[in-house]
Structures are given as structure tokens and as C-alpha cells.
Image: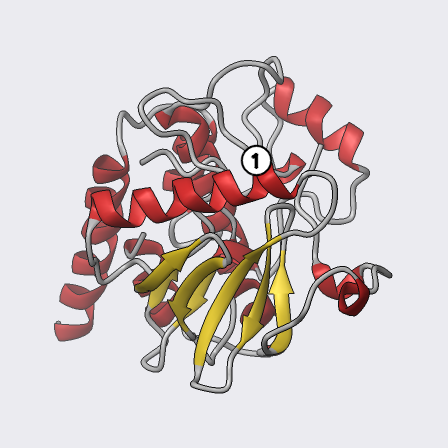
């Protein structure tokens, strides 16, 4: 079951439940994201009866940012307090929206995104932002598992490695979601996008996946789905090999 929520698609009147500090631009089950006047983004806890839990989830996200420290693949954290998490703003938006809005994207750019890439627990194009040079940065760490802690979020159906819903996330579950994310990068849509969610779960359980033989990273995607990689580093190495072979072929 996909637990994520797009704030833009709800009918909740947030103006009556909290004092907005900026323009509402996005959000999810844990927080609401606003663009502030100073050009930064504020992730504030989702209002309602669960707000204290959301405050704790955002605090955990801040802790992850501090542990990882500044990294070129993470959106930069600027500040954190009980009111929320202040982050740098990525004006090019999320990868999923960009993929949907572009008629044609070069294979070279897609391979770059595939190469760029804590157990996140919710890897998907919606949680990957594009900076000013269209490089990927990861967001939404509030649901992540830290030191074996229970995650506050989970993967959507098309990114979910079949298992009991109470099972803790692992490297394998993240890599399965990464496989589906790579599929969406190259195909422009999620695996089995037109198939009902309950049927997708059955297909994945039976290890029946969409065809990928015609996709540049098809074999890598298949191996992610089949849990044949031991780490994200292994995936990255495999993608780099494809990029190197493509570059060498272009030089001949």
C-alpha cells in the first residue's frame, strides 16, 4: 500500500489548521513543504492529531542530515527547530514531474541520473530533486530507518519488494525500489503503471516484472528486482561500466 500523499491532491484546508509561512509547494504524510520569501524551503510537520509524531519524524530527518553531513547528493539542510526543517530550494522540482513533462530526454542524461544515487525506505523519482544543473539530490529522509529503528514510511506498491508489511527494511528492499526508479527514469513511467496495485503486488511476488531487455540499464534493473546486488555501490559500478562502454564506443 502506497502511504505517500501529495498535498496538492488533498482537500484539506491548511490555512485553518496552521499558520502558513510561505507558498505551499508539496508535502507528504509527515510534512508540508513551503517556499519561503528568502528562497529557501520549509518542511513543517503535518498538522492534525499526529503532529507530535511528525515533529519526531522530522527531528529524525535532521539527525540523518547531521550524521551524513553535507553531501552533493543530498539537499542541504540549513536549520532545524520544532517548527520544521529549513532546506535549500530546488527550483527544477522532482524527477518524476520532470520525466512526465519532457517529450525527449537523452540517454546520456538518464545514465547520469542512474549513476547518481542510511536505508531510505521510500526511494522513488518523487523523492529525487533536480538542482540547477539537473543533477539529482535526495530528499524526504523523515521515514528512514536509522540504526534498525522502525521506519515511519514505506515504499509504494511499484517500488515494494514483496514481504510481510511488518518486516524491517533492508538494503535489498532499497535496491528493489532503486530498480523501479531506474525503470521509471528510462521508461518515463512506473512499472506496471496501468495495472491495479493489488495485481502489481501479485506479479512482483511471482517475480513477473515488466520487460527491460530494450532499456540501457535493463539487466541492472532486473538484478535489483531479483535481489542480486549486495549494495548500492555494486549497482553504481555496474552503471559506470555501461557509461564507460558507451563513451568508448563513441570514441571509436
At x 70% / y 63%, what residue is drawn? 18
Q: Position of residue 124 (x, y in %)?
A: 52, 49
Whether residue 9 sits left or right of residue 153 in the image: it is right
Instruction: Name above or below for residue 162 compared with residue 22.
Output: above
Q: Secondary structure at mark 1?
A: loop
Name the residue carrying label 1.
153
Q: Position of residue 94 (x, y in %)?
A: 51, 67
Whether residue 219 sits left or right of residue 247 in the image: it is right
Whether residue 168 sits left or right of residue 14 in the image: it is left
Query: Quarter of the image holding residue 131?
Result: bottom left
Give the color scheme: rainbow, by chain, secondary structure or one colour. secondary structure
Q: Nearer the viewer, residue 199 or 24?
A: 24
Q: Position of residue 43 (x, y in %)?
A: 51, 61
Query: Quarter of the image holding residue 165?
Result: top right
At x 62% / y 44%, what residue is drawn? 191
Q: Report crowding for label 1: few under 14, some 14 to 19, many 20 or more residues within 10 A (C-alpha).
A: many
At x 25% / y 53%, what residue is drawn? 242
Query: Quarter of the image holding residue 35?
Result: bottom right
At x 36% / y 64%, what residue is drawn? 136
Q: Nearer the viewer, residue 172 or 132?
A: 132
Q: Specify the quadrant that holds the C terminus.
A: bottom left
Amino acid at each position: 500500500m502506497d502511504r505517500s500523499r501529495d498535498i496538492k491532491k488533498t482537500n484539506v484546508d491548511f490555512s485553518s489548521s496552521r499558520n502558513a509561512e510561505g507558498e505551499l509547494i508539496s508535502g507528504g504524510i509527515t510534512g508540508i513543504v513551503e517556499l519561503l520569501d528568502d528562497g529557501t524551503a520549509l518542511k513543517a510537520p503535518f498538522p492534525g492529531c499526529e503532529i507530535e509524531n511528525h515533529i519526531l519524524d522530522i527531528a529524525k530527518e535532521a539527525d540523518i542530515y547531521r550524521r551524513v553531513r553535507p553531501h552533493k547528493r543530498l539537499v542541504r539542510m540549513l536549520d532545524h527547530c520544532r517548527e520544521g526543517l529549513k532546506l535549500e530550494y530546488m527550483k527544477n522540482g522532482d524527477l518524476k514531474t520532470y520525466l512526465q513533462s519532457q517529450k525527449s530526454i537523452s540517454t546520456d542524461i538518464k545514465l547520469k541520473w542512474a549513476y547518481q544515487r542510511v536505508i531510505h525506505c521510500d526511494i522513488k523519482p518523487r523523492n529525487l530533486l533536480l538542482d540547477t544543473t539537473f543533477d539529482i539530490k535526495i530528499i524526504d529522509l523523515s521515514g528512514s530507518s536509522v540504526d534498525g529503528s522502525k521506519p515511519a514510511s514505506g515504499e509504494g506498491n511499484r517500488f515494494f519488494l514483496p514481504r510481510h508489511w511488518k518486516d524491517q527494511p533492508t538494503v535489498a528492499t532499497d535496491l528493489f525500489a532503486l530498480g523501479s526508479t531506474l525503470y521509471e527514469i528510462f521508461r518515463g513511467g512506473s512499472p506496471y503503471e496501468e495495472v491495479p496495485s493489488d495485481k502489481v503486488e501479485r506479479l512482483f511476488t511471482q517475480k513477473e516484472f515488466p520487460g527491460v531487455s530494450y532499456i540501457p540499464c535493463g539487466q541492472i534493473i532486473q538484478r535489483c528486482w531479483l535481489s542480486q546486488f549486495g549494495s548500492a555501490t555494486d549497482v553504481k559500478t555496474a552503471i559506470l561500466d555501461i557509461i564507460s562502454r558507451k563513451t568508448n564506443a563513441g570514441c571509436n
